Amino acid sequence: MHILVTNDDGPPSNQSSPYIHSFVNTLQSAGHTVSVILPHQQRSWIGKAHFAAQVIKPTYFRPGSLHQDDGTTHAKPLQSDSDQGHEEWVLVNSTPATAAQLGLFHFFQDRGPVDLVVSGPNYGRNTTSLFSLSSGTIGGAMEAAVCRKRAVALSYAFFSRVHDPDIIGGASRKSVKLIEHLMNHWDDGVDLYSINVPLVDGIEGKKVLYTYALQNYWQSGSCFAEVDAKDEQDQDPEAKERAIREQGVMNRVGECGEMKKGHRHRHFTWTPNFSDVYQSVDESEPGNDGWAVKEGLVRYVKISYETPFTS
């Protein structure tokens, strides 16, 4: 198969995108033609957005060693015939959805039609409606689906920030086998599948469950924290996303004492309270996507535009 891969975490990085290189390598080892186009930086939580007024400028990434941050980025693509044996990915200063569009229609044309688009593996789970409806990983797959391409959104649920190459490799092999199975048994009316693979020992021997997405809601109030405008220091997107992952449950700031009239000038940062998600899973009945991943099981959900997140 010719498989187009995108994600919302950007190029390989042990800090912000630790799974993409292993997955691409596993697809290639299984005999697939793999074309890779990614956002050039972290784009989590962006859904299926496009930057309408932005000129998209690609750069070109040449992967290094597996699990090492030694790949290089270049302003121009490889040109000479002697360089054609070197692997090169495309990076774009935009979103996963834009990357999917450009990969389908503007790059890799010499490799023949794309049979499948895979968005991911995401650095973290995309279970339940709270995560899924904002996911840039699912957004990239949705963009492929509206272009009438079969699509898979793939996410790895981590339980440790130690990136074990053996566990990641097992998850990649499990993912490739499941994707190949779905391609050979694609259900009528399905636009894309969303797969979550827990990063646990022995994952290749774990069951695969077809589940439904748990419907849940934010219960703790605002997902934004107030920041004093005069004290704010901008962070790069990778640092912001890393802080969200590492904090887990965020402390709320900006609670008011005496209410004053008029607006107070403040800035705001995205700080969702993930305990809302985990509590909803703990309180739910068995069988949903969040429950399956909590139990260490691989799960997938069918998504169609007529019946999103169908059971």
Image (cartoon, helix red, strand yellow):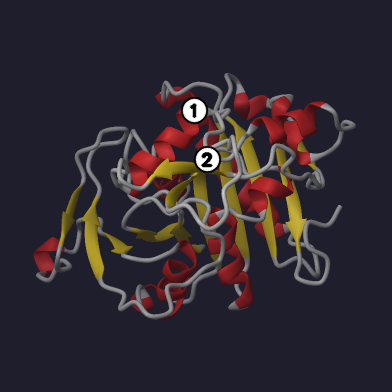
Which residue is nearer to you in this view: 47 or 101? 47
Disc 2, SS: loop
Q: Earlier in the sequence, mark 1 or mark 2?
A: 1
Foreground residue among 254 and 203: 254
**Image coordinates for residue 112, horizontal then vertical, percent:** 43, 76
Question: Residue 247 has which mark?
Answer: 1
Per the image, the residue denoted by label 2 is 271
**Residue 19 appears in view:** no
* Relative to 211, 39 lies left or right: left
Who's the residue at 22% across and 62% down the image? 60
Compared to residue 203, the image places residue 277 above or below, namely: below
Where, by quadrant of the figure, is residue 68 drawn? top left
How many neighbours does mark 2 have within 10 angstroms: few (below 14), some (14-19), or many (20 or more)? many
- Residue 220's x, y, as percent? 70, 37
* Amino acid of disc 2: Thr
Q: Are marks 1 and 2 in contact (CB under 8 Å)?
A: yes
Point 61% across, 26% down: residue: 203
